[in-house]
Amino acid sequence: MARLSGFAATAAFAILACTLGTEANNRYIPGRAVAARSTGISARAANAHGSVNAPKSHAKKALGKRRRSKKKCAPTSSDPVPAPEPTSSDPAPAPPSSDPVPQPTSTEAPAPPPPSTTPPSSTEAPPPPPTSTEAPPPPPPSTTEAPPPPPTTTEAPPPPPPVTTEAPPPPPPTTTEAPPPPPPTTTEAPPPPPTTEAPAPPPPAPPVNARKVGIAADWTSPKEVVANFKGDNTVGVYNWSPWKFDNLPDGVDFWPMLHGEESIADWGHVTSGYATKAMGCNEVNQQGQSTMNVQRGIDIWKQYLMPLKGQGYQLISHSTNQADDGTQWHKDFKDQCGECYDSIDAYSVHWYGTSADNFKSYVSGFHSALGKDIYVTEFACTDFSGQTTCDPGQAKALMDDLTDWMKQPEQDYIKGFFWFGMWPSLPGGVSPANTLVNGDGSPNDLGNNYKSK
């Protein structure tokens, strides 16, 4: 339909030129046809209503060409006027003249449609447009087709950017990789500081329970002995009697002892607030000491010691030595008085000998038999049978071995130990190698060693 309307528009332009008195020829102008096709809607309107509303610029161009041709407007037999393109209501136009028609250069201009079988008539020509200014100007097709090149230009730029963007990355990595090596070398230099960490080990050195060193001295011991041996590791002090020392230093926990039958008369002042721990009779299984049978030991315990339990005291059992009958005595006490056994907080044991293994075996065996905590309230390097002797070196070696063992976590059930030696001249036939003090009560070498435990 666009092509047919183009032919009608071309015919209309020719008639318009004749009406204005121009001498344009009546030949069919392909250029106008192209313009008409680009404005198909105006051509169809002209064909339907007998007028063409086209821009004035196109009309002027048409007039100019016709004046230059200097031909009359009327059509001749040799130059017929092309009929308008047929539409759905109008008949198809007559075939174009025999003169060759130049083909449009635009790629969009197709060949004219095939001629219709219906011959054109002179009366079929569309009426001329009302005014000469309404001639439709042909828009230059070539100008409309020009825009395509830009896309090609826009397509070209993209490639360069990627190449430029890809180039920079390589340099940075190389520069970034170089710095890392120096830091490690600098970090390796500080190894010396660990030397400052060395002091840390000393704190762990002290055993789990550091407060295990006890002081056992009596009224014949130098008065200054307790003050000279008191320290942060002191667990307590006792003197085999219910009475405190007159010069007892502040901060020392005194433990009164009901030594035997002779001490009952002095026991009345041991009441609430006087002390925190109370001790039973001394070596109940040993002749020459507080010898008594199990039943007498139960009676004294129930009458004089068990009442202190309700006054805030911790009760330490009657003591025995390492003789075989010592452990048995306590087993019988437990079997014959369950409530007495239940009131005991810890057992008191004594040991004298020269073998460290013998000591460890005795103490650990006693604990297994009775099942409660233990205080070793007397121990020293002495063989009462006289078969072996102890010199100061042997006494120190035994002291170190036994105290180190008792402070180990595995022996946490041993709550304290008391070396027998707070006299310049030891009583009871104990070897003088065990003494801890000088004549003035100051610690000797073995005394300082013990104090440091």
Image (cartoon, rainbow, N blue to C red):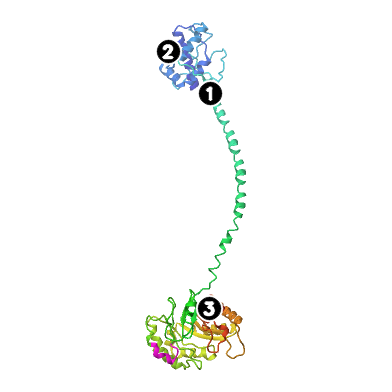
In this view, 187 is above or below 227? above
Residue 443: assigned label = 3
Residue 109 spot, x, y in % from top left: 54, 21
Secondary structure of the residue carrying tag 2 is helix
Residue 135 spot, x, y in % from top left: 44, 14
Q: Judge whether residue 261 is colored magenta.
A: yes
Q: Residue at horizontal 42%, vertical 13%?
A: 133
Tags 3 and 1 touching, CB below 8 Å: no
Q: Main secondary structure of the magenta part?
A: helix
In three-dimensional space, the C-alpha distance between marks 2 and 1, rounded to whole angstroms, equals 27 Å
Q: How many marks?
A: 3
Q: Can residue 449 be seen?
A: yes
The amino acid at mark 2 is Thr
Q: Which residue is mark 2?
A: 133
Q: Can residue 159 be seen?
A: no
Residue numbers of the magenta segment:
258-267
Label 1 environment density (alpha carbons within 10 Å; few <14, some 14–19, many ≥20)? few
Residue 69 spot, x, y in % from top left: 52, 7
Q: Which residue is mark 1?
A: 145
Q: Judge whether residue 335 is colored magenta.
A: no
Secondary structure of the residue carrying tag 1 is helix
